[in-house]
Image: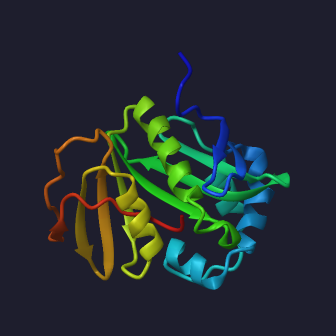
Amino acid sequence: MDDPMPETGTIALRDGTTIPYRPIRPSDREALQRFHGRHSDASTYLRFFAVQRALGDAQARYFTELDGANRFALVALDPADPREIIGVARFDREPGTDRAEYAVIVADVWQGHGLGLQLTRRLIAAATRRGVTAFCAFVLPQNRRMLHLLRDLGLPETVFHEDGVERIEVDLRGDDRHTTASQGGDQIAANVPVQAAHS
């Protein structure tokens, strides 16, 4: 039986465009730097909480040289030029746990087509195969695209306010179990899936 969410394949966007995707590779370092350089200041701020116009070599190596088990990422590729990255979804497992920090970012010109959502769904499938049961995303309150993306996943969420940032914990098991409040955060919702960059 075919895997409905393989780790290499294509994504059909709402407008019918077909986008190839696959796991990130160490050889993607320069493509990732070019991808980062094309972001608007607003997109960079919403993803990194700071304006960062260039991705240095050390950062690029960190984001592309992954072990594939505890650190994993999928890249979406430009259908007109598959050498170029147009989206990245990644998770980093918290050591010794079944939880992982999650983030996604999509190139400005490809936002609003559902690419971030579809890439995230495939990342979730990859994470669950590796024993991850929950994602944690740190989202600025003004990042409405990300919040809507997480909501559109349809998975149970717990949301905390922490120092001007929303920490959103998503239960990948898809049932009614929720993570309890911790570290003094104010729990404000329990079934509100959200997003961490741009869809």
Seen in the picture, residue 173 relative to 102 is either above or below; the reply is above
Would residue 119 be visible to someone looking at this image? yes
* Percent position of residue 109, x then y: 70, 71
Q: Which quadrant does the C terminus fall into?
A: bottom right
Q: Residue at x 48, y 49 (%)?
A: 91
Q: Nearer the viewer, residue 61 or 191?
A: 191
Q: Residue at x 67, y 41 (%)?
A: 10
Q: Nearer the viewer, residue 94 or 193?
A: 193
The single residue placed furthest to the top in the displayed view is 1
Q: In the picture provided, is 23 more to the left or to the right than 181?
A: right
The single residue placed furthest to the front in the displayed view is 15
* Percent position of residue 45, x then y: 54, 80
Seen in the picture, residue 149 relative to 51 is either above or below; the reply is above
* Percent position of residue 44, x then y: 59, 76
Would residue 55 be visible to someone looking at this image? no
Q: Quadrant of residue 15?
A: bottom right
Q: Nearer the viewer, residue 32 or 188?
A: 188
Q: In the picture provided, is 86 more to the left or to the right than 147?
A: right
Q: Residue at x 71, y 53 (%)?
A: 17
* Percent position of residue 117, x then y: 50, 55
Q: Nearer the viewer, residue 182 or 115?
A: 115
Q: Quadrant of residue 110?
A: bottom right
Q: In the picture provided, is 177 more to the left or to the right than 148?
A: left
Q: Residue at x 52, y 42 (%)?
A: 122
